[in-house]
């Protein structure tokens, strides 16, 4: 069986285990992300960024009011995107996802190539 966190059925990494523990402890985060994503999807938006949804939650919700102070880590974003798309048929393909670092050997070698290539920085555009 292929799990939502990878495509190679590997054992979960430390980041995945951290995410799963956080998700189990704070199910309200998933529910809020699900609600926001489905609202956007039903308004006709075909693609959206999971980190934008994270920022919406951070802005609109006071987590200490939920009884416990905690931080919504950006490390969890790719896992929430995958989980939402796996568990919610309406959200399939809603988020663009990349291979997760620390996953397959193929990803590690592709990432290493990108880090060793030199790219000239592009000048900043002053237009808005």
Image (tube, helix red, strand yellow):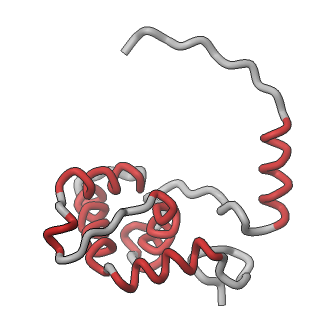
Left of 80 or right of it: where is 34? left
Query: In the image, is residue 84 above or below residue 117?
Result: below
Q: Residue furthest left?
A: 65
Which image quarter holds the N terminus? bottom right
Q: Is residue 26 left or right of residue 19?
A: left
Residue shown at 17% from the left, 77% from the top? 67
Q: Give above or below for 67 relative to 104.
A: below
Q: Is residue 68 left or right of residue 85?
A: left
Q: Quadrant of residue 26?
A: bottom left
Q: Does residue 40 appear in the picture of this structure?
A: yes
- Residue 9: percent from left, percent from top: 71, 83
Q: Front-most of 55 and 50?
A: 55
Left or right: residue 100 versus residue 29 is right
Residue displayed at 18% across by 60% down: 61
Q: Quadrant of the C terminus?
A: top left
Where does the image place residue 47, in percent across and percent down from the top left? 41, 51
Residue drawn at the location 65% of the way across and 84% of the way down: 2
Of all residues shown, which one is farthest toward the top? 126
Q: Residue at x 26, y 69 (%)?
A: 69
Q: Is residue 7 above or below residue 111?
A: below
**In which quarter of the view is residue 57 placed?**
bottom left
**Within the image, what quadrant is residue 11 found in?**
bottom right
Single out the residue that lies furthest toward the bottom.
1
Residue 39: image location, x then y, percent: 23, 61
Relative to 4, say whether 122 is above or below: above
Closest to the observer, 108 or 66:
66
- Compare residues 2 and 73 and report the one nearer the observer: 73
Please provide percent x and percent y for residue 41.
30, 58
Residue 47, can we see it? Answer: no
Total marks drawn? Answer: 0
């Amino acid at each position: 069986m292929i799990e939502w966190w990878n495509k190679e059925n590997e054992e979960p990494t430390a980041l995945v285990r951290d995410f799963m523990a956080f998700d189990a402890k704070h199910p309200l985060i998933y529910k809020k992300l699900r609600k926001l994503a489905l609202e956007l999807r039903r308004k006709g938006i075909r693609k959206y960024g999971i980190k934008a949804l994270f920022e919406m939650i951070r802005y609109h919700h006071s987590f200490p009011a939920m009884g416990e102070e905690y931080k919504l880590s950006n490390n969890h974003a790719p896992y929430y995107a995958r989980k939402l798309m796996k568990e919610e048929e309406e959200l399939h393909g809603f988020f663009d996802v990349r291979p997760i670092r620390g996953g397959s050997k193929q990803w590690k070698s592709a990432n290493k190539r990108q880090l060793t290539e030199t790219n000239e920085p592009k000048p900043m555009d002053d237009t808005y």
